[in-house]
Amino acid sequence: STPLYSSAASDVYKRQTQIVHSGRNKKWTGQAVNVPVYHASTIIFDTVAELQNGIKNFQKKIPFYGRRGTPTHFAFRDAMVELEGGHDCLVYPSGLAAINTALLSFLDSGDHLLMVDTVYGPTRALCNTVLKRMGIETSYYDPMVGKDIKSLIKKNTKVIFTESPGSVTMEVQDIPAISKVAREQGIIHMLDNTYGNLINFNPYDHGVDISIQAATKYIVGHSDAMLGTVSSTEKYWQRLQDNSSYMGQTAAPDDINLAMRGIRTINTRIKQHQESALKVANWLKSCPEVDLVLHPAFTDCPGHKIWKRDFNGSNGLFSFTLKTGNDEAVSAFLDNLKLFKMGYSWGGFESLVMSFYNLKKERKLALWDNYGPLIRLHIGLEDPGDLISDLEYGFKCFSKIK
Protein backbone atom coordinates (compact mmCIF):
# COMPACT_ATOMS: atom_id res chain seq x y z
CA SER A 1 0.00 0.00 0.00
CA THR A 2 1.04 3.61 -0.44
CA PRO A 3 2.91 4.69 2.70
CA LEU A 4 1.99 7.81 4.63
CA TYR A 5 5.09 9.72 5.62
CA SER A 6 5.52 11.91 8.68
CA SER A 7 7.58 15.09 8.80
CA ALA A 8 10.55 12.82 9.39
CA ALA A 9 10.80 11.34 5.91
CA SER A 10 12.23 8.06 7.18
CA ASP A 11 9.10 7.24 9.22
CA VAL A 12 6.53 5.01 7.54
CA TYR A 13 3.39 4.40 9.56
CA LYS A 14 1.36 1.22 9.89
CA ARG A 15 -2.08 0.97 8.32
CA GLN A 16 -4.19 1.87 11.34
CA THR A 17 -2.09 4.99 11.91
CA GLN A 18 -2.39 5.92 8.23
CA ILE A 19 -6.15 5.67 8.47
CA VAL A 20 -6.33 8.05 11.42
CA HIS A 21 -3.98 10.67 9.97
CA SER A 22 -4.67 10.54 6.21
CA GLY A 23 -5.85 13.78 4.61
CA ARG A 24 -5.07 15.80 7.74
CA ASN A 25 -2.75 18.34 6.16
CA LYS A 26 -2.89 21.61 8.11
CA LYS A 27 -3.38 23.31 4.76
CA TRP A 28 -6.91 21.86 4.84
CA THR A 29 -7.63 21.47 8.56
CA GLY A 30 -6.03 24.55 10.07
CA GLN A 31 -5.99 24.05 13.84
CA ALA A 32 -8.94 21.64 13.83
CA VAL A 33 -8.74 17.86 14.10
CA ASN A 34 -11.17 17.48 11.20
CA VAL A 35 -11.24 19.47 7.99
CA PRO A 36 -14.03 22.07 8.09
CA VAL A 37 -17.02 21.57 5.81
CA TYR A 38 -16.76 24.27 3.15
CA HIS A 39 -20.09 25.11 1.52
CA ALA A 40 -19.22 27.08 -1.59
CA SER A 41 -20.34 27.58 -5.13
CA THR A 42 -18.58 30.84 -5.94
CA ILE A 43 -14.97 31.44 -4.97
CA ILE A 44 -14.19 35.17 -4.96
CA PHE A 45 -10.97 36.91 -5.98
CA ASP A 46 -9.80 40.33 -4.90
CA THR A 47 -7.55 41.12 -7.85
CA VAL A 48 -7.27 40.33 -11.53
CA ALA A 49 -3.93 38.66 -10.81
CA GLU A 50 -5.55 36.32 -8.26
CA LEU A 51 -8.33 35.47 -10.72
CA GLN A 52 -5.89 34.78 -13.53
CA ASN A 53 -3.82 32.60 -11.23
CA GLY A 54 -6.98 30.66 -10.37
CA ILE A 55 -7.78 30.18 -14.05
CA LYS A 56 -4.23 29.04 -14.73
CA ASN A 57 -4.25 26.52 -11.88
CA PHE A 58 -7.91 25.49 -11.79
CA GLN A 59 -7.06 21.78 -12.10
CA LYS A 60 -4.81 21.87 -9.08
CA LYS A 61 -5.96 21.65 -5.47
CA ILE A 62 -6.61 25.39 -5.27
CA PRO A 63 -10.13 26.75 -4.67
CA PHE A 64 -11.41 28.19 -7.97
CA TYR A 65 -15.07 27.24 -8.28
CA GLY A 66 -17.23 25.10 -6.00
CA ARG A 67 -17.62 22.31 -8.55
CA ARG A 68 -13.84 22.12 -8.86
CA GLY A 69 -13.47 21.47 -5.14
CA THR A 70 -12.94 23.07 -1.77
CA PRO A 71 -10.53 22.14 1.05
CA THR A 72 -13.15 19.57 2.15
CA HIS A 73 -12.84 17.84 -1.22
CA PHE A 74 -9.06 18.18 -1.38
CA ALA A 75 -8.53 16.62 2.05
CA PHE A 76 -10.67 13.60 1.15
CA ARG A 77 -8.89 13.18 -2.18
CA ASP A 78 -5.54 13.26 -0.36
CA ALA A 79 -6.76 10.66 2.13
CA MET A 80 -7.93 8.32 -0.62
CA VAL A 81 -4.60 8.48 -2.44
CA GLU A 82 -2.64 7.97 0.78
CA LEU A 83 -4.69 4.87 1.59
CA GLU A 84 -5.54 3.36 -1.81
CA GLY A 85 -2.69 4.59 -3.97
CA GLY A 86 -2.77 6.04 -7.46
CA HIS A 87 -1.69 9.45 -8.73
CA ASP A 88 -4.82 11.29 -7.60
CA CYS A 89 -8.50 10.74 -6.91
CA LEU A 90 -11.79 12.42 -7.86
CA VAL A 91 -15.16 12.31 -6.11
CA TYR A 92 -18.61 11.71 -7.57
CA PRO A 93 -22.19 11.86 -6.26
CA SER A 94 -22.54 8.05 -6.21
CA GLY A 95 -20.64 4.87 -6.95
CA LEU A 96 -22.58 4.40 -10.18
CA ALA A 97 -21.70 7.93 -11.28
CA ALA A 98 -18.06 7.07 -10.66
CA ILE A 99 -18.29 3.87 -12.75
CA ASN A 100 -20.15 5.57 -15.58
CA THR A 101 -17.79 8.54 -15.75
CA ALA A 102 -14.72 6.31 -15.73
CA LEU A 103 -16.05 4.26 -18.64
CA LEU A 104 -17.31 7.26 -20.62
CA SER A 105 -13.99 9.05 -20.12
CA PHE A 106 -12.02 6.39 -21.99
CA LEU A 107 -14.43 4.74 -24.43
CA ASP A 108 -15.26 6.20 -27.84
CA SER A 109 -17.61 5.12 -30.61
CA GLY A 110 -16.19 2.02 -32.29
CA ASP A 111 -14.32 0.84 -29.19
CA HIS A 112 -14.70 -2.58 -27.60
CA LEU A 113 -15.17 -3.15 -23.86
CA LEU A 114 -14.47 -6.44 -22.07
CA MET A 115 -16.84 -6.55 -19.11
CA VAL A 116 -16.84 -9.25 -16.42
CA ASP A 117 -20.10 -11.22 -16.48
CA THR A 118 -20.54 -10.95 -12.71
CA VAL A 119 -20.55 -7.16 -12.74
CA TYR A 120 -22.86 -4.96 -10.65
CA GLY A 121 -26.27 -4.89 -12.35
CA PRO A 122 -26.51 -1.14 -13.07
CA THR A 123 -23.08 -1.25 -14.74
CA ARG A 124 -24.41 -3.96 -17.03
CA ALA A 125 -27.43 -1.77 -17.76
CA LEU A 126 -25.13 1.09 -18.80
CA CYS A 127 -23.27 -1.20 -21.20
CA ASN A 128 -26.47 -2.56 -22.73
CA THR A 129 -28.11 0.84 -23.22
CA VAL A 130 -26.01 4.02 -23.18
CA LEU A 131 -22.76 2.50 -24.43
CA LYS A 132 -24.60 0.50 -27.07
CA ARG A 133 -26.32 3.66 -28.37
CA MET A 134 -22.91 5.32 -28.56
CA GLY A 135 -21.58 2.56 -30.79
CA ILE A 136 -19.43 0.94 -28.11
CA GLU A 137 -19.41 -2.87 -28.19
CA THR A 138 -19.45 -4.83 -24.93
CA SER A 139 -18.43 -8.47 -24.59
CA TYR A 140 -19.02 -10.27 -21.28
CA TYR A 141 -16.38 -12.70 -20.07
CA ASP A 142 -16.14 -15.44 -17.45
CA PRO A 143 -14.78 -14.02 -14.18
CA MET A 144 -12.43 -16.99 -13.84
CA VAL A 145 -10.75 -16.48 -17.22
CA GLY A 146 -7.49 -15.09 -15.77
CA LYS A 147 -4.62 -14.74 -18.24
CA ASP A 148 -6.71 -16.41 -20.95
CA ILE A 149 -8.56 -13.13 -21.33
CA LYS A 150 -5.95 -12.47 -24.00
CA SER A 151 -7.92 -14.67 -26.41
CA LEU A 152 -10.95 -12.36 -26.06
CA ILE A 153 -9.13 -9.17 -26.98
CA LYS A 154 -10.01 -7.54 -30.29
CA LYS A 155 -8.13 -4.94 -32.29
CA ASN A 156 -10.46 -2.27 -30.94
CA THR A 157 -10.52 -3.42 -27.28
CA LYS A 158 -9.94 -0.32 -25.19
CA VAL A 159 -10.91 -1.27 -21.63
CA ILE A 160 -11.01 -4.42 -19.50
CA PHE A 161 -13.37 -3.98 -16.56
CA THR A 162 -13.08 -6.20 -13.48
CA GLU A 163 -15.01 -6.54 -10.23
CA SER A 164 -13.61 -8.86 -7.61
CA PRO A 165 -15.23 -10.61 -5.86
CA GLY A 166 -18.08 -10.68 -8.36
CA SER A 167 -21.35 -9.01 -7.53
CA VAL A 168 -23.72 -11.40 -5.76
CA THR A 169 -21.92 -14.69 -6.60
CA MET A 170 -18.51 -13.68 -5.18
CA GLU A 171 -16.09 -15.19 -7.74
CA VAL A 172 -12.56 -13.84 -7.15
CA GLN A 173 -10.75 -12.71 -10.29
CA ASP A 174 -7.04 -13.06 -10.95
CA ILE A 175 -6.41 -9.32 -11.07
CA PRO A 176 -2.60 -9.50 -11.47
CA ALA A 177 -2.90 -11.91 -14.42
CA ILE A 178 -5.48 -9.70 -16.16
CA SER A 179 -3.39 -6.59 -15.42
CA LYS A 180 -0.36 -8.20 -17.03
CA VAL A 181 -2.28 -8.98 -20.23
CA ALA A 182 -3.83 -5.51 -20.31
CA ARG A 183 -0.44 -3.85 -19.89
CA GLU A 184 1.13 -5.97 -22.65
CA GLN A 185 -1.72 -5.14 -25.02
CA GLY A 186 -1.93 -1.44 -24.18
CA ILE A 187 -5.44 -1.78 -22.75
CA ILE A 188 -6.80 0.13 -19.75
CA HIS A 189 -7.60 -2.07 -16.75
CA MET A 190 -10.40 -0.73 -14.53
CA LEU A 191 -11.46 -2.33 -11.26
CA ASP A 192 -14.58 -1.84 -9.18
CA ASN A 193 -12.77 -2.11 -5.85
CA THR A 194 -15.74 -1.48 -3.56
CA TYR A 195 -15.39 -4.88 -1.86
CA GLY A 196 -11.68 -4.25 -1.37
CA ASN A 197 -12.42 -0.84 0.20
CA LEU A 198 -9.30 0.66 1.80
CA ILE A 199 -8.43 -2.42 3.85
CA ASN A 200 -8.87 -5.65 1.90
CA PHE A 201 -7.23 -5.01 -1.48
CA ASN A 202 -4.76 -2.50 -2.88
CA PRO A 203 -5.41 -2.17 -6.64
CA TYR A 204 -2.14 -0.49 -7.58
CA ASP A 205 -0.06 -3.19 -5.95
CA HIS A 206 -1.73 -5.58 -8.42
CA GLY A 207 -1.33 -3.62 -11.65
CA VAL A 208 -4.70 -1.86 -11.97
CA ASP A 209 -4.80 1.41 -13.95
CA ILE A 210 -8.05 2.87 -12.63
CA SER A 211 -9.73 2.01 -9.32
CA ILE A 212 -13.38 2.79 -8.65
CA GLN A 213 -15.27 2.64 -5.36
CA ALA A 214 -18.80 3.16 -4.21
CA ALA A 215 -17.71 5.07 -1.12
CA THR A 216 -21.38 4.87 -0.15
CA LYS A 217 -20.57 1.42 1.19
CA TYR A 218 -17.73 0.81 3.68
CA ILE A 219 -16.01 4.17 3.43
CA VAL A 220 -19.07 6.15 4.54
CA GLY A 221 -20.12 3.11 6.56
CA HIS A 222 -23.31 4.46 8.12
CA SER A 223 -25.90 4.33 5.30
CA ASP A 224 -26.35 8.10 5.35
CA ALA A 225 -24.52 9.42 2.28
CA MET A 226 -24.00 8.61 -1.41
CA LEU A 227 -20.49 8.97 -2.79
CA GLY A 228 -18.18 7.53 -5.42
CA THR A 229 -14.44 7.75 -6.08
CA VAL A 230 -12.16 7.13 -9.02
CA SER A 231 -8.38 7.12 -8.71
CA SER A 232 -5.88 6.40 -11.46
CA THR A 233 -2.24 6.13 -12.35
CA GLU A 234 -0.56 9.27 -13.62
CA LYS A 235 -0.80 8.01 -17.21
CA TYR A 236 -4.60 8.24 -17.24
CA TRP A 237 -5.14 11.05 -14.75
CA GLN A 238 -5.38 14.04 -17.09
CA ARG A 239 -8.05 12.49 -19.31
CA LEU A 240 -10.04 11.32 -16.30
CA GLN A 241 -9.86 14.75 -14.71
CA ASP A 242 -10.77 16.57 -17.92
CA ASN A 243 -13.74 14.38 -18.78
CA SER A 244 -15.08 14.36 -15.24
CA SER A 245 -15.01 18.15 -15.34
CA TYR A 246 -16.70 18.30 -18.74
CA MET A 247 -19.50 16.09 -17.41
CA GLY A 248 -19.96 18.30 -14.36
CA GLN A 249 -19.19 15.58 -11.85
CA THR A 250 -18.75 16.62 -8.24
CA ALA A 251 -20.03 15.75 -4.77
CA ALA A 252 -21.47 17.70 -1.85
CA PRO A 253 -19.11 18.69 0.99
CA ASP A 254 -21.48 17.31 3.63
CA ASP A 255 -21.31 13.85 2.05
CA ILE A 256 -17.54 14.07 1.82
CA ASN A 257 -17.40 15.03 5.48
CA LEU A 258 -19.33 11.86 6.35
CA ALA A 259 -16.88 9.84 4.26
CA MET A 260 -13.92 11.37 6.08
CA ARG A 261 -15.57 10.41 9.36
CA GLY A 262 -16.06 6.88 8.05
CA ILE A 263 -12.42 6.52 7.06
CA ARG A 264 -11.29 7.00 10.65
CA THR A 265 -13.10 3.86 11.84
CA ILE A 266 -13.03 1.71 8.70
CA ASN A 267 -10.28 -0.64 9.87
CA THR A 268 -12.08 -1.44 13.13
CA ARG A 269 -15.44 -1.81 11.40
CA ILE A 270 -14.14 -4.11 8.66
CA LYS A 271 -12.59 -6.42 11.25
CA GLN A 272 -15.92 -6.73 13.06
CA HIS A 273 -17.90 -7.18 9.84
CA GLN A 274 -15.51 -9.94 8.80
CA GLU A 275 -15.58 -11.75 12.12
CA SER A 276 -19.35 -11.69 12.43
CA ALA A 277 -19.93 -12.62 8.78
CA LEU A 278 -17.71 -15.68 9.07
CA LYS A 279 -19.65 -16.83 12.14
CA VAL A 280 -22.95 -16.47 10.32
CA ALA A 281 -21.62 -18.02 7.10
CA ASN A 282 -20.23 -21.05 8.93
CA TRP A 283 -23.56 -21.53 10.70
CA LEU A 284 -25.40 -21.37 7.36
CA LYS A 285 -23.18 -24.16 6.03
CA SER A 286 -24.72 -26.45 8.65
CA CYS A 287 -28.32 -25.55 7.78
CA PRO A 288 -30.24 -28.30 5.95
CA GLU A 289 -32.04 -25.71 3.80
CA VAL A 290 -28.77 -24.28 2.40
CA ASP A 291 -27.03 -25.61 -0.69
CA LEU A 292 -24.05 -23.29 -1.28
CA VAL A 293 -22.49 -20.55 0.84
CA LEU A 294 -20.70 -18.15 -1.49
CA HIS A 295 -17.95 -16.52 0.58
CA PRO A 296 -14.39 -15.91 -0.68
CA ALA A 297 -12.86 -17.20 2.56
CA PHE A 298 -14.36 -20.67 1.96
CA THR A 299 -12.30 -23.13 -0.06
CA ASP A 300 -15.21 -24.03 -2.36
CA CYS A 301 -15.72 -20.42 -3.49
CA PRO A 302 -14.42 -19.92 -7.08
CA GLY A 303 -11.12 -18.10 -6.82
CA HIS A 304 -10.57 -18.79 -3.13
CA LYS A 305 -6.84 -19.42 -3.66
CA ILE A 306 -6.56 -16.08 -5.47
CA TRP A 307 -8.40 -14.37 -2.63
CA LYS A 308 -6.04 -15.92 -0.11
CA ARG A 309 -3.04 -14.80 -2.16
CA ASP A 310 -4.10 -11.23 -2.95
CA PHE A 311 -6.57 -10.04 -0.31
CA ASN A 312 -5.96 -8.94 3.27
CA GLY A 313 -9.31 -10.28 4.45
CA SER A 314 -13.04 -10.28 3.83
CA ASN A 315 -15.92 -8.16 5.08
CA GLY A 316 -19.63 -8.53 5.83
CA LEU A 317 -20.89 -9.37 2.34
CA PHE A 318 -21.66 -12.88 1.03
CA SER A 319 -24.46 -14.94 -0.52
CA PHE A 320 -26.01 -18.37 -0.20
CA THR A 321 -28.32 -20.53 -2.26
CA LEU A 322 -31.23 -22.64 -1.03
CA LYS A 323 -31.66 -26.28 -2.04
CA THR A 324 -35.28 -25.66 -2.93
CA GLY A 325 -38.05 -23.18 -2.31
CA ASN A 326 -40.72 -21.36 -4.27
CA ASP A 327 -41.44 -17.64 -4.20
CA GLU A 328 -43.96 -18.00 -1.39
CA ALA A 329 -41.50 -19.87 0.85
CA VAL A 330 -38.69 -17.40 0.21
CA SER A 331 -41.06 -14.52 0.93
CA ALA A 332 -42.02 -16.18 4.23
CA PHE A 333 -38.33 -16.40 5.11
CA LEU A 334 -37.68 -12.74 4.27
CA ASP A 335 -40.88 -11.36 5.76
CA ASN A 336 -40.26 -12.95 9.16
CA LEU A 337 -36.75 -11.62 9.71
CA LYS A 338 -36.61 -8.91 12.36
CA LEU A 339 -32.97 -7.78 12.50
CA PHE A 340 -32.21 -8.26 8.81
CA LYS A 341 -33.97 -5.56 6.82
CA MET A 342 -34.59 -5.83 3.10
CA GLY A 343 -32.86 -3.11 1.14
CA TYR A 344 -30.30 -2.34 -1.52
CA SER A 345 -26.70 -1.32 -0.88
CA TRP A 346 -24.43 -2.70 1.85
CA GLY A 347 -21.45 -1.66 3.94
CA GLY A 348 -23.40 0.11 6.67
CA PHE A 349 -23.57 -0.77 10.35
CA GLU A 350 -26.87 -2.63 9.87
CA SER A 351 -27.52 -6.12 8.51
CA LEU A 352 -29.36 -6.39 5.20
CA VAL A 353 -30.92 -9.21 3.19
CA MET A 354 -31.77 -9.26 -0.49
CA SER A 355 -32.96 -12.10 -2.69
CA PHE A 356 -32.22 -12.51 -6.41
CA TYR A 357 -34.78 -14.76 -8.07
CA ASN A 358 -33.73 -14.44 -11.71
CA LEU A 359 -29.96 -14.40 -11.54
CA LYS A 360 -29.64 -16.86 -14.43
CA LYS A 361 -31.47 -14.37 -16.65
CA GLU A 362 -29.06 -11.57 -15.71
CA ARG A 363 -25.91 -13.49 -16.62
CA LYS A 364 -24.78 -14.36 -20.12
CA LEU A 365 -22.15 -16.95 -19.24
CA ALA A 366 -22.44 -18.14 -15.64
CA LEU A 367 -25.12 -20.83 -15.42
CA TRP A 368 -27.25 -20.96 -12.28
CA ASP A 369 -30.04 -23.21 -13.57
CA ASN A 370 -29.14 -26.00 -11.14
CA TYR A 371 -29.41 -23.94 -7.99
CA GLY A 372 -32.31 -22.76 -5.92
CA PRO A 373 -33.04 -19.17 -4.87
CA LEU A 374 -30.00 -17.06 -4.08
CA ILE A 375 -30.01 -14.74 -1.09
CA ARG A 376 -27.38 -12.09 -0.41
CA LEU A 377 -26.58 -10.97 3.12
CA HIS A 378 -24.67 -8.07 4.51
CA ILE A 379 -23.67 -8.74 8.10
CA GLY A 380 -23.64 -5.55 10.13
CA LEU A 381 -22.32 -4.75 13.57
CA GLU A 382 -25.02 -6.49 15.60
CA ASP A 383 -24.23 -9.48 17.80
CA PRO A 384 -23.76 -12.44 15.41
CA GLY A 385 -25.63 -14.77 17.77
CA ASP A 386 -28.69 -12.54 17.51
CA LEU A 387 -28.40 -12.54 13.72
CA ILE A 388 -28.19 -16.35 13.65
CA SER A 389 -31.31 -16.59 15.81
CA ASP A 390 -33.09 -14.25 13.41
CA LEU A 391 -32.16 -16.40 10.40
CA GLU A 392 -33.09 -19.55 12.28
CA TYR A 393 -36.61 -18.26 12.81
CA GLY A 394 -36.81 -17.25 9.16
CA PHE A 395 -35.92 -20.81 8.12
CA LYS A 396 -38.69 -22.17 10.37
CA CYS A 397 -41.18 -20.02 8.50
CA PHE A 398 -39.61 -21.04 5.19
CA SER A 399 -39.86 -24.76 5.97
CA LYS A 400 -43.57 -24.56 6.73
CA ILE A 401 -44.25 -23.58 3.10
CA LYS A 402 -41.48 -24.97 0.92
Image (cartoon, rainbow, N blue to C red):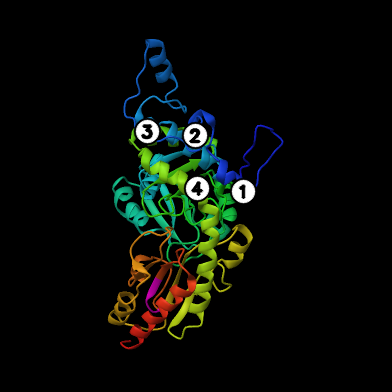
* Amino acid type, label 1: Arg
Whether residue 257 sits left or right of residue 132 in the image: it is right
Disc 4 marks a residue whose amino acid type is: Ile
> Disc 1 designates what residue?
15
From the viewer's perspective, is residue 174 above or below residue 342? above
Q: Nearer the viewer, residue 79 or 369?
A: 79
Residue 129 is covered by the magenta coloring: no
* Residue, disc 2: 32
The majority secondary structure of the magenta stretch comes to: loop
Q: Which residue is mark 4?
A: 263
Q: Amino acid at mark 3?
A: Ser
* Magenta stretch, residue numbers: 370-375
Quadrant occupied by the C terminus: bottom left
Residue 217 percent across, percent down from the top left: 42, 54
Is disc 2 surrounded by few (<14), some (14 to 19) or many (20+) residues within 10 Å? few
Q: Estimate the spatial distance between the alpha carbons at disc 1 and disc 2, rounded to whole Å.
A: 22 Å
Q: Residue 199: where, in percent of width, then height?
A: 56, 53
Q: Residue furthest right?
A: 10
Q: Residue at x 41, y 49 (%)?
A: 112
The residue pinned by badge 3 equals 245
Q: Which labelled disc corresponds to residue 338?
A: none
Kindly identify the amino acid type of the residue bearing the numbered disc 2.
Ala
